[in-house]
Image: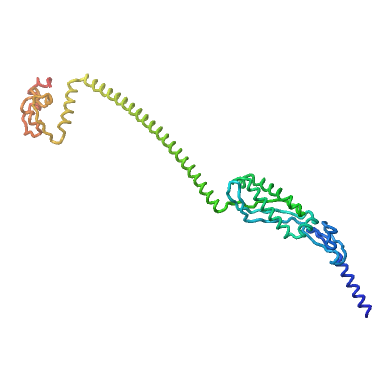
Amino acid sequence: MNRLVILGIAVLAVIYLFFSSIYVVNEREQAIVMRFGRITDIHKDPGIYFKIPTSMIDTVQVVEDRLLRYDLANMRVQVSGGQFYVVDAFLTYRIADPRLFRERAQGELRVAEQRIATRFDSALRQVYGLRNFNAALSDERAQMMREARDLIRPDMAELGIEVVDVRILRTDLTPEVSAQTYERMKAERLAEAALLRARGKEAAQSLRAIADRQAVEVVAAARKDAEVLRGEGDAQRSAVFADAYSKDPEFFQFYRSMESYRNALGSNGTTMVLSPDTDFFQYFGTPGSSASQPPAIPSVDATPAPATTPAPVAAPAEQPAAAPAQ
């Protein structure tokens, strides 16, 4: 019975010694082996390793071998012109030298990130402080990130940390600067709009003046053509009248007299008091008689009684000699 107990204890001791003497390092980790607090070995390759089977002699500290990230949010930085930005940025890093990382940061990411936060903040302020207001929003952004990375690398290398990259996620104006920028942009756009409006009015006035001048020229040319055509028409009219007059002057005089009677007397019962001896009434007399005879007066007053003078006009057989005179 005692032998079985001793054998069991021995087996348990062997198992304990076996499992306490091995440790596993995977592909995402690095192992720091320390003996009495001093670093004796570093294992970066994944695999199974052995150590002295007791935690009082050999201890193993496992640290990350992956790419790590540190974020810095809502950081207020000042540019060279005095304005302020609100910046979000991050950096990526990895533990390149586990020995230095253990000696100077105790192998703790918390201690390392405190140092990273201080240097990262300082580097960003230095990079932004060397540039004007619009540089962070221009093509210089990539250069700024490289400069910040290069500023952080020397200090982080002392901790055994390699800074791989720095990225600026966001660069926004502070509310005060944003309001000032908006007002300035608004004033600039209003000034530009006023300039464009003034140029438009100037162009409109120029075009209106040209159109008015062209209208005057067109109207003047039309009036000139109208006067020329009117003159030509009057000339043709006068030529037609002259031709008609030359063919039968007596008939033409008679026709013009009838037109004058119609225009002067009309159909409204016009009364005219004139001497019957005037040339105007030369065709109101009877055939073979003078235009100044009394029977012509009632017809001019447009209120005649039944006259007896027209009877000889209707009987040309009694006065054959009067017809040629008429």
Name, please, the residue furthest toward the top: 246
The residue lying at 58 percent from left, 48 percent from top is: 82
Answer with the quarter of the image where residue 226 lies: top left
Q: Position of residue 163 (x, y in %)?
A: 73, 52
Q: Nearer the viewer, residue 7 or 118?
A: 118
Q: Residue furthest right?
A: 3
Residue drawn at (92%, 76%), measured in percent from left and top? 6
Q: How is the image coloured?
A: rainbow
Residue name at image x 81 percent, y 56 percent: 99
Instruction: Say left or right for 325 vs 61.
Output: left
Snapshot quadrant of residue 254: top left
In the picture, the quarter occupied by the C terminus is top left
Image quadrant holding the N terminus, namely bottom right
Q: Position of residue 209 (x, y in %)?
A: 40, 33
Image x and y of residue 145, in percent: 67, 48
Tell me: 20 left or right of 255: right
Residue 30 at x, y = what percent?
Answer: 80, 58
